[in-house]
Image (cartoon, rainbow, N blue to C red):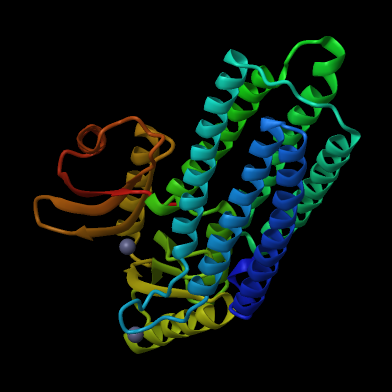
Amino acid sequence: MIDFLDPQKGKVREQYGKKSSLIGIFVNVFLFIIKFAVGTLFHSVAVVADAVNSLADAGSSVISLISFKLSSKPADEKHPFGHERIEYIASSVVAVFILLLGIELLKTSFNKIVRPDEIEFSFVVVGVLLFSIAAKLWLYGFNIKLAKRIDSSMLRATAADSLSDVLATSSVLLSTILSPLLGFQLDGYVGILVSVFIMMSGLNILKETLDFLLGQVPSGELVELIDSYVKKYDGVLGIHDLVIHNYGPRRYFASVHVEVDAKEDILVSHDLIDNIERNIAQDLGIHLVIHLDPIITDDPFVNELRELTAKVVSGVDDSLSMHDFRVVKGFTHSNLIFDVVIPHQCKKSDSEVIEEITQKIKEKDKNLFTVITIDRSYI
Ligand SMILES: [Zn+2]
Ligand SMILES: [Zn+2]
């Protein structure tokens, strides 16, 4: 099963988040203190700016600590869907923070090109910068490992930030060493490159979080999991119209139509879907609502028309699929009632699809009328 769906993992998630945040605060405050001290001592604005960068990271870690604390809060009267989406908001805040920092560094770098500083070279500065790079590389590895384990956008954002810090500090180190050798102040130019990189990483996190907030297509893995879970029950002839929502990384709600034999007793069929709903909640932590669709399977007239219609539908566009097929027989003509799913990659409009299907069915038999409902795919 997918690790993050396990309801038992909620506590673990909070603990990992807290661990990452506390370590982040400790490491970054320490880096700020030593870099600020040597930067001031040896008159290097670049090193001081790099120190401020670390202080900002400590600030982001405080935000993530608060967000992990708040998002693990259980559902309550006002927020029955829980508080997990706070993580998405906190990620956006961190992203904007990184973006602003990038803009700030860009300004500082321009100023350094216009008015280069006399920088005093010292191996103490080199040593402190090397230590800072090593610490950030370690933080990156640490956070990316935790992020993968609990599938956290917040921790992934923190890891991405650690990596951009490695580049920022490396450029400071490079210009610290090269500038006195070349007799030319490099750091302004290197600074511009690094600020652009930092701004890009902020924008990327913002974009990813926006995808979560807007609601994205569920992972194929999750769709496959629900599909095979429901279909393994005896009496389930097929499923369609699966819709999946989430209110955070672990809070999933879904609905699906389950096809059952129309001849089966309604009480038996209802019992079947009730069992599926209860079991999937227990096993996967997904709150699933199932709609029952009776299917006529033993009427040769209906079967023949269903086959004909399915052929026509896939003939119009092979990405189309059909379900909920019913026939209302009349003396002079019959009505075919069914739904057609148009996936987003299909470029035909709803009315084009309806028109083409209706026309093609008419060509087969002019006494067949169609009542078509168009569905848009949510998976
Ligand atoms: Zn249906
Ligand atoms: Zn029920």
Task: State the image coordinates of residue 364 (x, y, percent, origin top left).
Answer: 26, 36
The quadrant where ligand 1 appears is bottom left
Q: Position of residue 318 (x, y in %)?
A: 43, 36
Q: Is residue 349 left or right of residue 37?
A: left
In which image quadrant can residue 133 be found? top right
Residue 8 coordinates in the image, percent (x, y): 63, 81
Residue plotted at (34% across, 67% down): 296
- Say if 109 sits above or below 352 in the image: above
Residue in the image at 77% along x and 34% along y: 42
Residue, x 70% and y 22% (percent of image)?
187
Residue at 63%, 71% in the rendered image: 13
- Say whether residue 92 is left or right of residue 27: left
- Relative to the observer, which residue lies in front, 292 or 285? 285
On the rendered structure, is 22 left or right of 323?
right
Could you tell me if residue 231 is visible in this image?
Answer: no
Q: 209 above or below 150?
A: above
Q: In which quarter of the image is the N terminus?
A: bottom right
Q: Is residue 225 left or right of residue 313?
A: right
Considering every residue shown, the one lying at the far left of the view is 332
Pick the residue in front: 114 or 309.
Answer: 114
Closer-to-camera residue (66/325): 66
Q: In this view, does 353 lie above or below 146?
A: above
